[in-house]
Image (spheres, grey):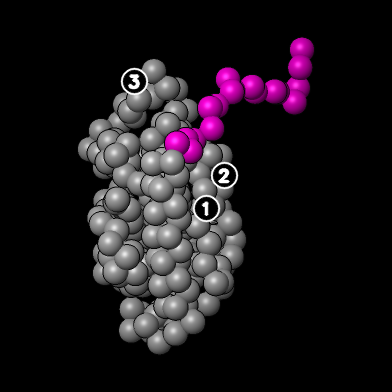
Amino acid sequence: MKVLLVNGSSRARGCTYTALEEVAGALNRNGIETEFIQIGVNPVAGCNGCGACTKTGKCFREGDGVNDFVEKARSADGFVFGSPVHYASASGAITSFLDRAFYGKGAAFQGKPGACVVSCRRGGASSTFDQLNKYFTMNCMPIVSSQYWNMVHGNTPEEVKQDLEGMQTMRTLGNNMAWLLKCIEAGKFGGVNFPEREPVVKTNFIRG
């Protein structure tokens, strides 16, 4: 089993990475393979809602890692997305990235556990945490929880490591994700499959 950990920070080895690394360590100790994906360094274009990906299965934009990630997501078993807090929200890079990765490509994610982790110096972590979790709840993904909201505090990686409660929360998150992945795998062997989806119904609030 494999979990993809996506770092939405422009600092490849900064505070967000420190949190993700702690989650990965717990997953590895439970026999789960992990892969880090860094997306916060180079520019990521936002989704323009053209809908082309609903027909082709990939975004028409190339070269910024979104399509490569979606291909990896199809065979992955779980996901952890990390972001720093920017004005009480997720980073612009990971927001643009996730908008395009999820839109029109939900089949790559449904039924697979997802989690997010956020890092901040002081405030705004809760609203960022809420924002990122919404991607999972719109794509039939089990959300992995921990002993507290998945956040760490600190202005440097060294300070993050001093947030002992935050680091423990990361380890608990990794352990819980490993447990859920193994439960899902065991269920498949026992004939418990993901529920069959009904055709999607969309209701507009304004009708002619």
Left or right of 198? Residue 38 is left
Q: Identify the amino acid type marked 2.
A: Thr
Q: Identify the residue at horizontal 39%, vertical 80% (top origin).
A: 160
Q: Secondary structure at mark 2?
A: helix
Closer to the camera in the image, 189 or 60? 189
The residue where tag 2 is placed is 137
Residue 41 in percent (x, y) is at 27, 56
Left or right of 205? Residue 108 is left
Residue 172 in percent (x, y) is at 45, 71
Q: Identify the residue at horizontal 39%, vertical 54% (top origin).
A: 182
Please state the extent of the stretch shown in magenta in the rendering: 191-208
CA gap, disc 3 and disc 1? 28 Å
128 shown above or below 50: below
46 shown above or below 167: above
Q: Give the numbered dot on residue 143.
A: 1
Does residue 63 show up? yes
- Is 114 magenta? The answer is no
Q: Identify the residue at horizontal 42%, vertical 22% (top origin).
A: 54
Q: Which residue is farthest front? A: 190
Badges 3 and 1: C-beta atoms under 8 Å apart? no
The residue where tag 3 is placed is 56
Badge 2: few (under 14), some or many (20 or more) residues near its Cα, within 10 Å?
few
Q: Secondary structure at mark 1?
A: loop
Left or right of 17? Residue 207 is right
